[in-house]
Image: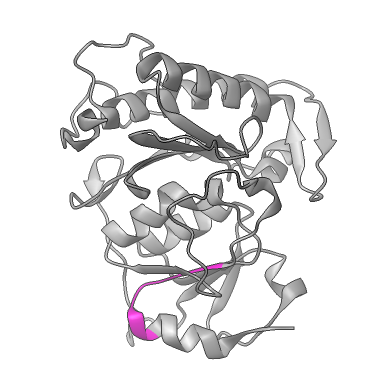
Amino acid sequence: MTRILNNDLSCDNQYSATGSDILSPMETPIQFATRLASQASQLLLEYYNRQSNQIKLKPDQSLVTEADLASDRLIARSIHEYTPDALIISEELASIFPERIADSIWVIDPLDGTTNFSLGLQYWGVSIACLVDGLPELGVISFPMLNEVYIALRRNGAFLNGKPIQVKAPDSQFPAPFFSCCSRTYQDYFVRVPYKTRILGSATYSFCSVARGISVLSFEARPKIWDLAAVWLLVQEAGGVVETFDQRPLFPPLPGLDYSLHNFPCLAAATPALKQKAHSWILPL
């Protein structure tokens, strides 16, 4: 899909958690993804503000709500209207990567932070990435309750609500940098990171905290490809480093693979030196 190479970051309502549903014939992929994240965020807010949502337990013991499924359907339908030949990997409805060739691959997390969402906590959002030649080319991540929209476009930087962001290395003048991780980190690993720990309940937001310079290091023990695709690019474009902890390749996606069955322990760091140190601070049990 050659349109993905258009680097125009400007669009109406681009940095808002809500926006128009009108599709312009000249809409670029980054504009489309931003608008779509806005629409999905609005849909999720409607579910969030209800008194109750149906909650089910998936085989991997993670939660799924009716809001996850509705958001997934909305995003997938819109992508197919925008680019009918695109392939989609999504958490709820399309976890098996198709065995055919396409110019673009869209990787969707329709609701990251489902447990937070179901308990009324604010750290949840939508993550949309587009891969070209098997690698993330653009990513849009929206956290509507926080009024935060993150955008990354390969070779064009990382942004939060329209303003450039970058990672921050540990500062000797501020001796208490943050390490963000998931609760499963302490089930699967022996951890002796010498920083204050924060567990945010959203893999995507945990890595966003590195990209925007809040955390200097982040580790997720059992993320899936849809947790990582957009924020992987965001961390890179913000000047950080990100890798799977066991060096398994995450990209390009493998045809026929059911990504719901595969975790990719992943590390994001503000500097290469921190990434190296993390391998001695975080050890498998």
- Decide which of 4, 114 is in the foreground and name it: 4
Instruction: Say if the magenta span includes residue 271.
Output: yes
State whether residue 1 is above or below residue 223: above
Instruction: Say if the magenta span includes residue 179.
Output: no
* x and y percentages locating residue 72 in the rendered image: 59, 27
The residue drawn where x is 21% and y is 31% is: 2
Query: Left or right of 194: which side holds 165?
Result: left
The magenta segment is 266-273
Examine the image and state in which quarter residue 118 appears.
top right
Query: Left or right of 106: which side holds 5?
Result: left
Query: Left or right of 9: which side holds 254?
Result: right
Query: Left or right of 27: which side holds 150?
Result: right
* x and y percentages locating residue 36 in the rendered image: 41, 24
What quarter of the picture does the C terminus occupy? Answer: bottom right
The residue drawn where x is 70% and y is 51% is: 261
Say if residue 147 shows up in the picture: no
The residue drawn where x is 49% and y is 53% is: 228
State whether residue 208 is above or below residue 279: above
State whether residue 184 is above or below residue 145: below
State whether residue 54 is above or below residue 238: above
**Which residue, as the protein is rendered here, is positioned at the far front?**
100
Q: How many marks?
A: 0
Query: Please, which colouring scheme is shown?
Result: one colour
* x and y percentages locating residue 272 in the rendered image: 34, 80
- Decide which of 237, 167 is in the foreground and name it: 237
The residue drawn where x is 32% and y is 85% is: 173
Say if residue 80 shows up in the picture: yes
Examine the image and state in which quarter residue 109 appears.
top right
